Image (cartoon, coloured by chain):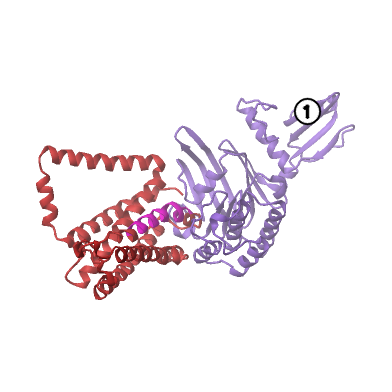
Chain colours: A purple, B red
Amino acid sequence: MNVVRMSGVTKRYGQVTALDGVSMELAENRIHGLLGRNGAGKTTVMQILTGQAFETSGGVEVFGEHPYENAGVLGRICFIKESQRYPDFFKVKHALRAAELLYPHWDAGFAAELVADFALPADRNIRKLSRGMLSAVGVIIGLASRAPLTFFDEPYLGLDAVARQLFYDRLLADYAEHPRTVVLSTHLIDEVSDLIEHVVLIDKGRILIDEDAEALRTRAVTVTGPVASVESFVAGRTVLHREQLGGFLRVTVSGVPDRPSVGGLEFEAVSLQQLVVRTTQMNGLHNGQPVAAGTGNGGNR
Amino acid sequence: MNRVLDVARVQAVNWRGIVAWPLGILAFTLVINVAIFGAIGDAAPPEGRVTGALSSIYIVMFVAHLQTITQVFPFALGLSVTRRAFFAGTALVVVAQALFFGLVLLLLEWVERTTGGWGVGVRYFGLPFLIQENPLTQWLVYVVPFLAVSAIGVFMGVVFKRWGQAGMYVLTMTAGVLAAGFAIVVTWQRSWPSVGSFFTGQSTFALLAGYPLVIALVLGGVGWFTIRRATP
């Protein structure tokens, strides 16, 4: 069953087209990774799905209905964003208490555990929290609310590596016990690649990849070898990236179901992060903007 | 309706902010004023022992509800509250606060009268133009201005959330232009006497409870429709 359905959704802010005909579906009880560069349109997608922003055109369905001002739909959604505002006069405990009042499946015991795990001072004023602590508040609300559809929009800002791992571990463990649909938007793709089951890659307001993570992992391969052999192997395939060093060529191609045992060629798996970066760069090329060091476009290499 | 109550409870999560803080400011200004009038002794004649510091609690309410929209609204929307439920919950909180604070003021006005102006003959609550004949209208005279200032705060917050800084500029400039235009037209028509007689012709109850209620209802209604397209 699909929890989310977007069909041909376009969003314009004045002259800027933030989303350009986005269509996608998100299946129930899975962890979806919503990936893409800054400004790709990830947050806009989540804002529209939570009724916080309004699509210019296209169809939006969440739990089968349009989410805008729809109490029945919104009551089942939790949206934790990096820029979430908390009232200045709230303490940490007030924010958690507010979430408890609003989410029927809230688990106060779990929340208290998480507060201890993240060493969060419950009595401290929200204004006086460090960036990492502020992110922890969001993470705790997102996890303990147990909302059937939970969005995390770059929830880790300022969290150190240990705290981030804690978040991933707790998310996975709680997800196993209480299955729900999670949408995780992140730049730290390597960190979450084991976590996400379905990948949506968005760039310049368009969907580039919408596929199972498992299928994606086997989709692309990097092949290295003498120029001539590699060239003949990759002929006719989609080349995502190539680099040459003397007589050796290293090419990342997609659409190789199994690795043929061609003599002199070495095959390596492509990490999800590599695949995302290369695919995004390819999209830049198609848009007439060459990807090369120094253009600024390849800055996420 | 349930959701509206939830929103009201979320706003009351930090009850100090919406009850204790305004009353604290009120107590603080009261003590200061009593101390001042005690200190200056007979230097101020009995009819001059009047203070306008009561307005402090109304200003606190205005600011508090401006913040309700600029700060609590984005938070509540993040927690999947609908705009309608948020607005209705806010209205509920405002009305409850106004009724309660009105009652407190009514009580303190009685205390002020029975203690001879806190022992120093000062009129802090029982301002001459505020005094009504019966407790009910007296209560309303205290309550309704709370509704009006809160509605103005909420409305300004909603305009800011929907149209940003530009919206605030347009709002304040429009208000300024309307006020100036009114003054120009009245001066040009030499109608100031009739403006004055309009106000003196109205009962204080109408001026303090009637027209403010109209302001609260109109701004509340416009705000209800404006917030529906506001983004956090």
Disc 1 target residue: A243
- Indicate whether A42 appears above or below B60: above
Pointer 1 chain:
A
Magenta stretch contains residue B60: yes
Magenta-highlighted stretch: main secondary structure? helix
Magenta stretch contains residue A224: no
Q: Residue furthest right?
A: A263
Q: Which residues are magenta?
A: B58-74
Q: Residues within 10 Å of mark 1 (few under 14, many from 20)?
A: few
In this rendered view, identify the residue nearer to me: B140 or B34: B34
User: Residue A292: x, y in percent?
Assistant: 69, 26
Q: Quadrant of residue B90?
A: bottom left
User: Residue B38: x, y in percent?
Assistant: 30, 66
Q: Amino acid at mark 1?
A: Glu
Give the left or right position of residue A184, taking residue A53 as reference: right
Give the left or right position of residue B190, taking residue A51 as reference: left
Residue drawn at x 46%, y 43% is A55
Residue drawn at x 64%, y 55% is A30
